[in-house]
Amino acid sequence: MTRLPNQFARTPVAATHPRRLTGVLACLGCLGLLLLLSIAVGSKNIPPATVLDALGDDTGRADAYVIWDLRIPRTAVTSAVGVALGVAGVLVQALTRNPLADPGVLGVNAGAAFFVAVGITVFGITSISGYVWFAFAGALVVTVAVYLIGSAGRGGADPVQLVLAGVAFGAVLGGLVTAMVLIDVRAFDRMRNWNAGSVAGRGWDALLPVLPFLVLGLLLAVVAASALNAVALGDDLARSLGANITRTRIVVVLAVTLLAGGATAIAGPIGFVGLMVPHVARWIVGPDQRWILAYALVLAPSLVLTADVLGRVLGPGDGEFPVGVVTAFVGAPVLILLVRRKKASGL
């Protein structure tokens, strides 16, 4: 009975099902259209033909300035945040074997928010490039603390203990953040935009310092993907198949910290992406974590780009809705429909 799962875990990805590869290519095409739409749509709508023309001429015209200095950096930030949150959601759900888990359950958002509040209230940090490092450090410190607490005992790290420790840390730090921002009006004003999950005003200065950590997190996710197929079968069966459970959990926790911590540092806590994208991917390709990861790499940035464009179009007046607000409105009904399908909600 152990032979079939072992063969399943070692089957090359390209040799499984050609329809899955075709689906990935189709999703890539949709992603390309959304990238173009993100560059074209805003307070000043630019025709796609003008966008394509301006991409080859980055000097001397107002449209070229808007595209190269404002829209392209924001689109890159939005795409990177989407990829990071989607992959982190896949890893967390596979690690905890809980289809309702997302990166926030490991304390990532709580740690980032707490350190940002400290940076603003104690150190007077005012710029995005300044408090992005506080957010990243907070995500790292709290996630490591959650892992150490969740792995205490003879059995080592346990998915249930990790979730409980993450939820406990989130509740405590969330209360501390609320108290800090209520006491300090300046901190409240600066936290309000970040805490809503927004990519407005984010550019290369926010993305480039964090980008190496996101790339490292993606590499770790790819390394852990095959082992997660065995982990999903249960610890005992996974060990009988030769999987190193402890090493896999450490790699996954580190990858989630780098990915979700980096995304949260850049744009604030954006919900539903890490929760919904793995469900959509499982609904399309089944339980193989390698294919779920491949689809998440495309579907997650597509979702965040769509939310960002809708936020610009539907925003009041010259304003816009933050990405985190739009993903909640879009994600909630879609997720409800998906989880009603047994194939989508099961791990």
Image (cartoon, helix red, strand yellow):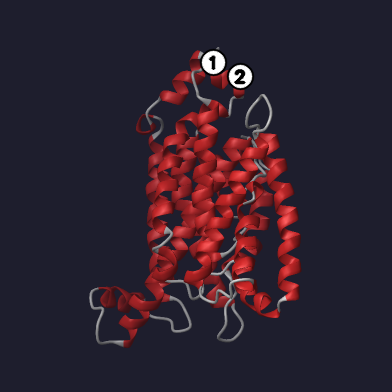
> Residue 267 location in percent, x, y?
53, 65
Give the class, few, some or many, for how many residues have Cα within 10 Å of label 1's Cα (few <14, many ≥20): few
Relative to 219, 248 lies left or right? right
Q: Nearer the viewer, residue 174 or 53?
A: 174
Q: Residue at x 68, y 41 (%)?
A: 163
**Do the numbered discs 1 and 2 sit on residues whose CB atoms are within 8 Å?**
yes
Which quadrant would residue 245 be assigned to in this image? top right
Which quadrant would residue 76 be assigned to in this image? bottom left
User: Looking at the picture, which amino acid does disc 1 mark?
Assistant: Ser
Mark 2: secondary structure: helix
Mark 1: secondary structure: helix
The residue carrying mark 2 is: 236
> Residue 176 location in percent, x, y?
74, 62
Relative to 230, 204 lies left or right? left
Relative to 193, 247 lies left or right? left
User: Looking at the picture, which amino acid does disc 2 mark?
Assistant: Asp
